[in-house]
Image (cartoon, grey):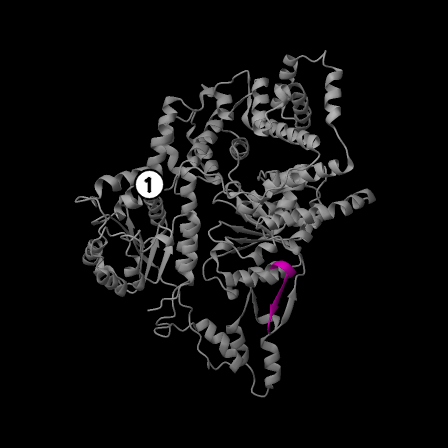
Amino acid sequence: MDSSDASRRSGFAPRLLEFADELRHEGMHVGTSELLDAFAALEHVPWTSEEDFRSALAATLAKSQEDRRVFDILFERYFFRAVEREAVERGLAEHGAIEDGYQGDQNMLDLDSLRNQIRNAVRAGSDGEMRDLARLAIAAFGREGAGSGVIGVDVQRIRRTLGLKGQSEQDMAARPDPDAVPRERLRQFERHLRRELERDMIERTQALPPARPLREFDRALPTNPTQDLAQVHRVVMQLKRRLATQGHEMRGRRRGRVVDVRRTMRASLETGGVPLHLRYRPRRPRRPELFVLCDVSTSVTSASVFFLSVLHALHDSFRKLRSFVFVERISEVSEVFERERSFKAVSRAIATDSGVADVSGYTDYGRVWLEFYEQVIDDLDPRSTVIVLGDARTNGREPHAKAFGAIAERSNRMFWMNPEPKLYWNYGDSVMAAYEPYCDGVFECWTTKQLEGFVNALTDQRATR
Amino acid sequence: MAAELQSVDQVKARLAEVGYLADEPAALVSYLAAQLGKPVLVEGPAGVGKTELAKALSRATERRLIRLQCYEGLDEAKALYEWNYRKQLLRIQSEARDTGWETVKEDIFGEEFLLERPLLTAIATEEPVVLLIDEIDKTDQEFEAMLLELLSDFQISIPELGVIEAKSHPIVVLTSNNSRELTEALKRRCLYLWLDYPDAERELEIVRLHAPDLPDSVARRLVEVVHMVRNLDLKKPPSIAESIDWARALLLLGAEDIDQSVLEHTMSIIIKHRTDLDMVAERVGVKLTDGLIGRQSA
């Protein structure tokens, strides 16, 4: 490492610290040791390659996939802003340069050739060339009508004027369109456009737009229905794991322990080979048996989709799991889940076949407990955990809290997850209060995050009865 | 040894020589791991080549690979070291009566009675090694805590013997399937690498590398199908190893093309669940007959 590198780093260190500070503001854990690692790593990668630079920082600072996402967003933003701020502070302006440069050869450069040039550059995927051409394009088309003031709109307008069309790689291979360019590359070009427009705006206003904290929206992993389901799958995996490893009380621990010969002998050496202290095999946590009851009535339709995905995911993760759905009657759906894999098919099967709403279509919790008690009571044992998902709205019917209590009595633990915010509990026909005393825990549950909270509470919970 | 790996490109080239096509971040992080002497934590879905990366590193650096497979209930006696109590007992019993207690006591806690388990072996050997701690997420947090001393200082404290320091500096690779959140303390000591399924281009290269005789059009089609299958919500999406297996099987069968019947006969190589089989046959098989994919080869 020569001296110029060293001097550059002395200017760079504060920048990196600032960047780390921004990461911390977004909730990432960046400690001093991470920062030291980052500096150490940067000694080994070339400064000139942005990709390597970024990967090296990411490997040392961002230690999970979620963190990596936040890191990427902030990296873009921070280093772009850092350069711009420097420029504003030193009064550098490229503003004129673009226009002068462009006006200089305006006569030679007609728009069609610019279009072609850009298309070729995008196809070739040369980063530097794309950047230069993006600036040229902004100079040529960007100020028609002085722009809309909204950068996203301007980017799309310029793209349209240039006649650029994206096509996915598969389509390209199948049906090549002479005018189209690879979609990924087009995005890259749009990013350049966006940056150059932002730069332009900063130069005009001589100030940086305020840095906003990331919204939940930006931070969340990309979502579509199947991915939402994947997220639920993940949370449930965790639920299963924690159930399996923790939360098993010391109940009956002294009974029936098995002597671990190996460790007893090992311990006996401290006493000259005489086994004075017996060592026992650690008790393996037993497999949890889950009974899940899920409300699918209209008062919770919006939540029931979520419920179902939870059920669905649970089914994949537990070996011993019986699931039931209910409206005014109860119906076991364990089989449906064994048979069907697709989410849609399951919903359909439950809606049509389970026959839970054959009388009035209103939830009748009281009756549900009685039926559940009758059907399942013999299978409940002190190993069972019962989880109820429902809003506890009985439509004015008898809640039969006693029957519910009897079920709780027979099982090890009883949890209630309510899809309504806590504020609404016990208002109107909600009889949450009647059931709450029998439960080991009651939880709000209308987002994945709360589901995760439930998982945590489940493991901390010690059975109180 | 670390001097062997001199640049990111060299790491990449070396790994390719031993049959592992690393992408840019993987090569960079491996390079940094060797340079900085830090453990690497590799996370990602099952079957993207996390374990394979460690094996390839060991081949590329010509170091021995020591593997510790983690499971629930793994404890220090199986991971770090253990006293060979049988031998110790024999030693005590074979003792002539007049030997003093002091000598025996000194004796039975010597290195002679120490059984080395993978972690101790990894740092006690003269030759530097590659240490793979596989599926660290399967163990409990206590075990993680036990690893911390080893990972940050490359030493192990044995109460009866004192601290054993590393004679050589191993490259440590930890893999995790992300089935639980690892502790901050562990993550802080590691470089982080997220491996994902490769994009079509890279997977095609991988398939070509491992089944060079497979016709190009078939290989391309195979990668397309595998990618389509991975996009479905399956219980177990096909791994890279399975696409290689599939490629080899197709080569054996002398398949000229992948159409619906070929897929149905051979898809049990990449799909391992009955319900998944149905779903793939339904969603992907149909597209193959319609010629919706792979049209360019026609």
Residue B46 lies, with reference to residue B183, above or below; the image says above
| Residue at image location 65% in from the left, 14% down from the top | A111
In the picture provided, is B168 more to the left or to the right than B42? right
Please identify the quadrant where the C terminus of chain B is shown.
Answer: top left
Query: Where does label 1 land, which residue?
Result: A341
Front residue (pair B99, A315): A315
In the picture provided, is A127 more to the left or to the right than A298? right
| Residue at image location 47% in from the left, 72% down from the top | A263
Count of numbered marks: 1
Does the magenta-highlighted stretch encompass residue A199?
no
Q: What element carries label 1?
A: loop
| x then y, percent, for residue A160 | 56, 20
In the picture provided, is B281 more to the left or to the right than A92? left
Q: Residue most toward the bottom?
A: B98
- Magenta residues (range): B151-159
Front residue (pair A210, A328): A210
| x then y, percent, for residue A311 | 33, 48
Q: Residue most toward the left?
A: A359
| x then y, percent, for residue A213 | 58, 44
Residue A179 lies, with reference to residue A25, above or below; the image says above
Crowd rating for badge 1 (residues with CA inside 10 Å; few <14, some 14–19, many 20+):
some
Is residue A56 at all visible to an observer of this figure? yes
Q: Mark 1 falls within which chain?
A: A
Amino acid found under the numbered disc labelled 1: Arg
| x then y, percent, for residue B224 | 46, 29
Q: Residue most toward the front?
A: A428
Is residue B128 at all visible to an observer of this figure? no
